[in-house]
Image (spheres, grey):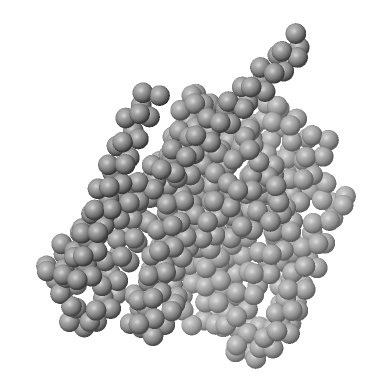
């Protein structure tokens, strides 16, 4: 009880800060950043597309780590393992949301720049496959019976994590239209203009904070659901004991 | 009994069961034959075009056919609660998995042996590349499908909509392997590019996933 009394206000402050950062980043991105020399105003979608794609590559790691902790604690400390599972499901859902936004903004941008909604290029295909993997993870959670959902989902998460590098390499060999990455590519010509950088970084920060907020919110929701389930199970046991007397 | 003794024991049991009923092999054979005929009618390909698409069609047919068999693979063990007995037996769980996967591998391989001549007839195929490489690509590709397929069939055993769930989780995971086998097969048939890279991909995929399947099977078997 004590903890939730502190965590509630922290959550609200965090949400307020997040909305502030997103508002400031939107102002920088949409109004203050200079117009791109080649693409005009269309390029401004980069401030949404790239942060979302970067973050949708980050949340799967949270999912994997939480799933590994779940498998480790499953027999040793079942209560702790439930918290790990709550983190796993929250991060999987946030991954699907961010990857969906990345794919959707990418399609809008591609329609204007390339004249195509979709092309089977390496980066697009691997992002789509990442999305498919995590949707299948959520489907498994939906379809499996209670009591073993967590274990099965954690196992599938390990499979997905091993699959991702193989997918990445295979698709790279298969196709290579999407511009080379601007960041971490080692190509000195492919660089963002310094005047655009602040808008970009503020957007990354804002959307990262928003993702963390969503993750924590979903986590708290899942914890409540777990607690309710435990209480119901406990009541059922007590009722059956009274009957026995 | 040694580990491989257990594996062999499970394998022999599965082969014997299949020999008595022949359900899944007959089912797979007829199903993949139908897929080959339907695709042939749908695309009506010329000899040059069929070389381009045959690799894809072959593996899609095998993928769908093996799904039908894999869904049945573990239901046999559920009858009379055999699976619970096996969970209690002192043999290592991964031996049970390996035996089952090898049995499924043999079933699908048998289907391939029967299907290959039909494929050549219906699509007027002759390989322009190194045909002997099929001897490498076919077992590697089959194992990639069957190993994960057997594992996920066990994973979905106690879920609702078991038959639906298997393809839903097997397809996304198998996409790199499917890409590898289709590209390698097309490379051999057309002789336009080297299949070596894709064969290496299949080897890496098989090594990685066979290891994980063996390590995690116990967790899945006793997930409760």
* Residue B108, picture quadrant: bottom right
Quadrant in which the N terminus of chain B is drawn: top right
Can residue B143 be seen in this snapshot?
no
Q: Position of residue A136 (x, y in %)?
A: 55, 55
- In this rendered view, identify the residue nearer to me: A183 or B55: A183
Residue B199 is left or right of residue B33, and the answer is left
Q: Position of residue A39 (x, y in %)?
A: 24, 82
Q: What residue is shown at x 74% (from left), y 79% (from top)?
A: B38
Residue most toward the top? Answer: A245
Above or below for A17 versus B177: above
Total numbered badges shown on the rendered structure: 0
Looking at this view, is A143 or B222 the one in front? A143
Asked whether the viewer can see residue B25, the reply is yes
User: Where's the C terminus of chain B, which quadrant?
Assistant: top right
Q: What's the residue at 77%, 72% (across, down)?
A: B33
Q: Residue placed farthest to the left in the image? A: A194
Q: Position of residue A3 (x, y in %)?
A: 36, 26
Left/right placement of residue A5 relative to residue A201 reads: right
Residue located 79% across and 56% down the image: B24
Residue A102 locus on image (x, y percent): 38, 65
Residue at 52% across / 68% down in the picture? Answer: B179
**Residue B163 placement: quadrant:** bottom right
């Amino acid at each position: 009880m004590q903890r939730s009394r502190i965590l509630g206000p922290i959550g609200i402050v965090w949400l307020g800060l997040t909305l502030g950062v997103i508002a400031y980043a939107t102002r920088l991105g949409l109004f203050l950043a200079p117009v791109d020399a080649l693409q005009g105003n269309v390029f401004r979608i980069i401030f949404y597309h790239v942060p979302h794609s970067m973050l949708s590559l980050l949340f799967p790691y949270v999912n994997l780590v939480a799933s590994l902790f779940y498998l480790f604690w499953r027999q040793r400390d079942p209560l702790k393992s439930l918290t790990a599972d709550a983190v796993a499901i929250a991060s999987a859902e946030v991954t699907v949301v961010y990857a969906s936004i990345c794919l959707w903004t990418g399609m809008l941008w591609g329609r204007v720049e390339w004249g195509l909604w979709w092309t089977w290029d390496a980066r697009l295909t691997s992002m789509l496959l990442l999305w498919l993997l995590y949707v299948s993870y959520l489907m498994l959670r939906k379809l499996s019976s209670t009591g073993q959902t967590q274990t099965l989902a954690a196992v599938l998460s390990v499979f997905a994590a091993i699959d991702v590098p193989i997918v990445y390499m295979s698709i790279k060999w298969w196709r290579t239209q999407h511009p080379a990455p601007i960041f971490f590519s080692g190509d000195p010509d492919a660089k963002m203009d310094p005047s655009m950088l602040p808008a970009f970084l503020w957007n990354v920060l804002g959307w990262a904070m928003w993702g963390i907020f969503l993750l924590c919110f979903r986590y708290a929701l899942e914890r409540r659901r777990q607690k309710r389930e435990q209480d119901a199970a406990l009541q059922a046991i007590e009722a059956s004991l009274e009957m026995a007397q | 009994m040694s580990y491989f003794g257990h594996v062999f024991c499970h394998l022999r049991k599965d082969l014997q069961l299949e020999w008595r009923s022949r359900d899944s092999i007959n089912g797979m054979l007829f199903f993949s034959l139908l897929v080959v005929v339907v695709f042939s009618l749908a695309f009506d390909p010329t000899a040059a075009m069929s070389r381009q698409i045959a690799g894809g069609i072959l593996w899609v047919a095998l993928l769908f056919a093996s799904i039908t068999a894999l869904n049945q693979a573990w239901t046999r063990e559920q009858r009379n609660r055999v699976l619970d007995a096996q969970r209690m037996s002192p043999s290592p769980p991964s031996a049970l998995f390996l035996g089952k996967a090898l049995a499924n591998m043999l079933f699908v391989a048998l289907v391939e042996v029967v299907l290959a001549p039909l494929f050549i007839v219906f699509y007027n195929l002759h390989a322009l590349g190194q045909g002997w490489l099929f001897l490498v690509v076919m077992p590697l590709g089959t194992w990639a499908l069957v190993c994960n397929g057997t594992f996920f069939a066990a994973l979905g055993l106690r879920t609702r909509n078991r038959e639906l769930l298997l393809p839903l989780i097997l397809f996304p995971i198998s996409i790199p392997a499917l890409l590898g086998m289709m590209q390698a097969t097309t490379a051999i048939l057309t002789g336009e590019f080297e299949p070596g890279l894709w064969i290496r991909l299949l080897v890496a995929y098989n090594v990685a996933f066979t290891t994980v399947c063996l390590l995690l099977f116990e967790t899945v078997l006793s997930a409760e």
